[in-house]
């Protein structure tokens, strides 16, 4: 893939690696630095170092080699299947499981397990790395996730996701005691300008994001809440709750670096309910997954605080 940019007056006098990071949203700064080192980036037809500061009128050419997608292997694993028919399969994802293969995680993912269980019956719209996957939840988030067995079902469910008609209710434990019994956070979310690996409330370049929350139980220093999503942005609940100074317990990315409860792995977040119109029958279906044991154990500990 060949990319071409011309630097404007407003864009000049910044390092080229930073300039390209802003222009190429899907490429990390470290990857762009590797391209610069390999002389795959030319400024006015000449290679430059990452420290080069762009000037107005600079003509920048960037060659991005095509990604080579590895073969994804089917793996026999115990899946907690909530429902399955010829079009969809709903799974209760455990904590610590990655949804689909990615660099550093090519085995042990939900997709590896689905490939074994469903054989060749998974939609191909999202490519070989994400067969059947129409949405995802984070590695350390537990709960209901839907996968599609054919492209017809995939397109129908994806359309519902896009128009925000899918019911998605999560349970979480957050730091601090929420004063209001319920509330709505309506703030756009986008890449964090200071750290491209994170998301943040981004009024300038973010996409619409709406989270409704209500208090289920208050404890000393913590609150058990339910969140209902209107939109499905990356890390939405984690970012939104952190933005009102109530980050999720265990979330060391958007909350405190230290975790006050021993052996807690990642954010305390559970996708409890998923509801949708079935792609074949047009009837509404809703599925729930019980709170995982670690979550209920935490609630019991908090009652004793």
Image (cartoon, rainbow, N blue to C red):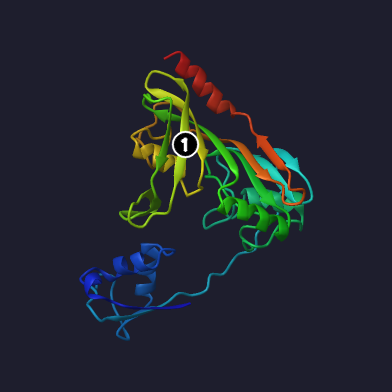
For disc 1, the marked residue is: 212
Examine the image and state in which quarter residue 81 appears: top right
74 to 270, vertically: above or below: below
Residue 79 visible in image: no
Q: Position of residue 82 (x, y in %)?
A: 71, 38
Q: Position of residue 109 (x, y in %)?
A: 61, 49
Q: Give the residue furthest to the left.
A: 13
Examine the image and state in which quarter residue 273 appears: top right
Q: Position of residue 64 (x, y in %)?
A: 45, 74
Element under disc 1:
strand
**Quadrant holding the C terminus:** top left
Q: Nearer the viewer, residue 229 or 79?
A: 229
Question: Residue shown at 74%/40% (left/top)?
Answer: 83
Q: Give the residue furthest to the top.
A: 304
Question: Residue shown at 65%/46% (left/top)?
Answer: 146
281 on left or right of 213: right
């Amino acid at each position: 893939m060949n990319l071409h940019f011309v630097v404007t007056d407003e864009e000049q006098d910044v390092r080229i690696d930073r300039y390209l990071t802003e222009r190429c949203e899907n490429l990390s700064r470290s990857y762009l630095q590797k391209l610069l080192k390999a002389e795959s980036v030319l400024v006015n037809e000449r290679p430059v170092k990452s420290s080069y500061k762009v000037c107005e009128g600079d003509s920048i050419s960037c060659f991005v080699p095509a990604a080579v997608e590895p073969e994804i292997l089917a793996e026999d694993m115990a899946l907690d299947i909530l429902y399955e028919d010829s079009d969809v399969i709903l799974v209760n994802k455990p904590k610590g499981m990655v949804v689909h293969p990615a660099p550093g995680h090519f085995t042990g993912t939900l997709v590896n397990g689905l490939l074994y269980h469903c054989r060749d019956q998974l939609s191909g719209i999202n490519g070989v790395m994400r067969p059947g996957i129409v949405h995802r939840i984070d590695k350390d988030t537990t709960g209901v996730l839907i996968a599609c067995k054919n492209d017809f079902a995939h397109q129908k469910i994806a359309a519902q996701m896009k128009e925000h008609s899918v019911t998605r209710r999560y349970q979480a434990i957050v730091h601090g005691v929420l004063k209001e019994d319920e509330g709505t956070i309506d703030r756009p979310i986008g890449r964090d300008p200071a750290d491209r690996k994170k998301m943040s409330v981004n009024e300038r370049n973010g996409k619409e994001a709406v989270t409704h929350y209500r208090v289920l139980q208050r404890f000393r220093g913590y609150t058990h809440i339910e969140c209902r999503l209107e939109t499905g942005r990356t890390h939405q609940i984690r970012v939104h709750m952190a933005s009102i100074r109530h980050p999720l317990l265990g979330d060391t990315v958007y909350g405190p670096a230290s975790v006050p409860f021993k052996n807690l792995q990642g954010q305390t977040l559970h996708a409890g309910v998923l509801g949708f119109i079935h792609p074949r029958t047009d009837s509404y279906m809703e599925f729930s997954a019980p709170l995982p044991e670690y979550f209920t154990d935490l609630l019991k500990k908090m009652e004793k605080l």
